[in-house]
Image (cartoon, coloured by chain):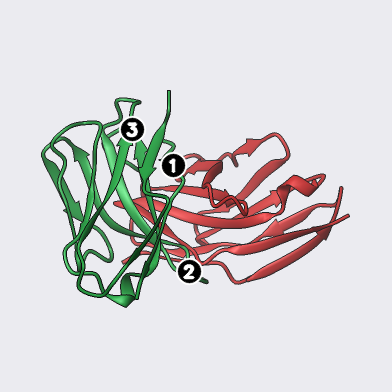
């Protein structure tokens, strides 16, 4: 199993550009989520999904969109990038659709810089 | 909203010694989960230990153990026989709707 994979590893965007961060898992996990990590901070939940076709907002959803058309994939879209979105982004998945009573497996992260 | 507080931005311990990392949290829920994650310089998030709030017994995983005080909303991590490979950022996390993380403690291991 590859686990949780994220692409790209690094990305530089200009203000106003759009892009999609890709996340995929091959463990047939129900729950998937996106976090951002800023310097001196822990991870903060952006969006999550408890199964295909179901998504919900986390703590910091503004400026981000998600969709979950398959169990395996959970892309994160930035529609109009802003410097405040400069961060490291982590995707995570877990077996149970509650997402919190089972181990969450994290991807390696994407470092995004918006200039 | 739940909050998680790690009051020690940085801790230093001699190799082979024991160190305790502190974590407190605030919640009105009675059923939840608590976690400690390790983040080495590689940036990978690694689960260290997990505690179910309904269990009174403290979780242990080899050299890692927790002191869970539900009434005090405290969840500290004890690392015994510290090793150089334990050097990392350690994050405490609360689980209910997604995970809420503390800001982390940077653990330094002195050889």
Picture layout, residue A84 above or below residue A108: below
Residue B48, by quadrant, is top right
Residue A98 visible in the shown view:
no
Residue A30, percent across and down? Answer: 26, 32
Left or right? Give the position of B87 relative to B23: right
Q: List x then y, in percent, for residue A52.
A: 15, 35
Q: Nearer the viewer, mark 2 or mark 3?
A: 3
Q: Colour of chain B?
A: red
Q: Are marks 2 and 3 on the same chain?
A: yes
Circles 3 and 1 in contact, beta carbons < 8 Å: no
Q: Chain of mark 3?
A: A
Label 2 – label 3 distance at C-alpha = 26 Å
Judged from the image, the secondary structure of the residue bearing numbered disc 3 is strand
Q: CA distance from mark 1 to mark 2?
A: 28 Å
Q: Is residue B1 left or right of residue A10?
A: left
Q: According to the image, label 1 marks what residue?
A: B54
The colour chain A appears in is green
Q: Residue at x 48, y 69 (%)?
A: A41
> Which mark identifies residue B93?
none
Residue matched to label 2: A41
2 or 3: tag closer to the N-terminus:
3
Residue located 51% across and 43% down the image: B51
Q: Is residue B21 left or right of residue B50?
A: right
* SS state under label 1: loop
Residue drawn at the location 34% of the way across and 61% of the way down: B28
Q: Is residue B104 above or below residue A67?
A: below
Q: x%, y% of residue A10?
A: 42, 56
Mark 3 = which residue?
A25
Report if residue B15 is visible in the image. yes
Chain letter of disc 2 in the image? A
Chain letter of disc 1 in the image: B
At mark 2, the secondary structure is: loop
């Amino acid at each position: 199993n590859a686990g949780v994979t994220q692409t790209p590893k690094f990305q530089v965007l200009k203000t106003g550009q759009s892009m999609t961060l890709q996340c995929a898992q091959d463990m047939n996990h129900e729950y998937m989520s996106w976090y951002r990590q800023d310097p001196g901070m822990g991870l903060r939940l952006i969006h999550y999904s408890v199964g295909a076709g179901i998504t919900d907002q986390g703590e910091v959803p503004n400026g981000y969109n998600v969709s979950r058309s398959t169990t395996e994939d959970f892309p994160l879209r930035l529609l109009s990038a802003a410097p405040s979105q400069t961060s490291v982004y982590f995707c995570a998945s877990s077996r149970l659709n509650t997402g919190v009573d089972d181990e969450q497996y994290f991807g390696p992260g994407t470092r995004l810089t918006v200039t | 909203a739940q909050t998680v507080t790690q009051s020690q931005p940085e801790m230093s311990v001699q190799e082979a010694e024991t160190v305790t990392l502190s974590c407190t949290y605030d919640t009105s829920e009675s059923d939840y989960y608590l976690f400690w994650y390790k983040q080495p310089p590689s940036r990978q998030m690694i689960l260290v230990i997990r505690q179910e709030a309904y269990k009174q017994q403290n979780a242990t995983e080899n050299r890692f153990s927790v002191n869970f005080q539900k009434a005090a909303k405290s969840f500290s991590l004890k690392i015994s026989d510290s090793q150089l490979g334990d050097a990392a950022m350690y994050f405490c996390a609360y689980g209910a709707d997604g995970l809420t993380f503390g800001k982390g403690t940077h653990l330094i291991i002195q050889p």
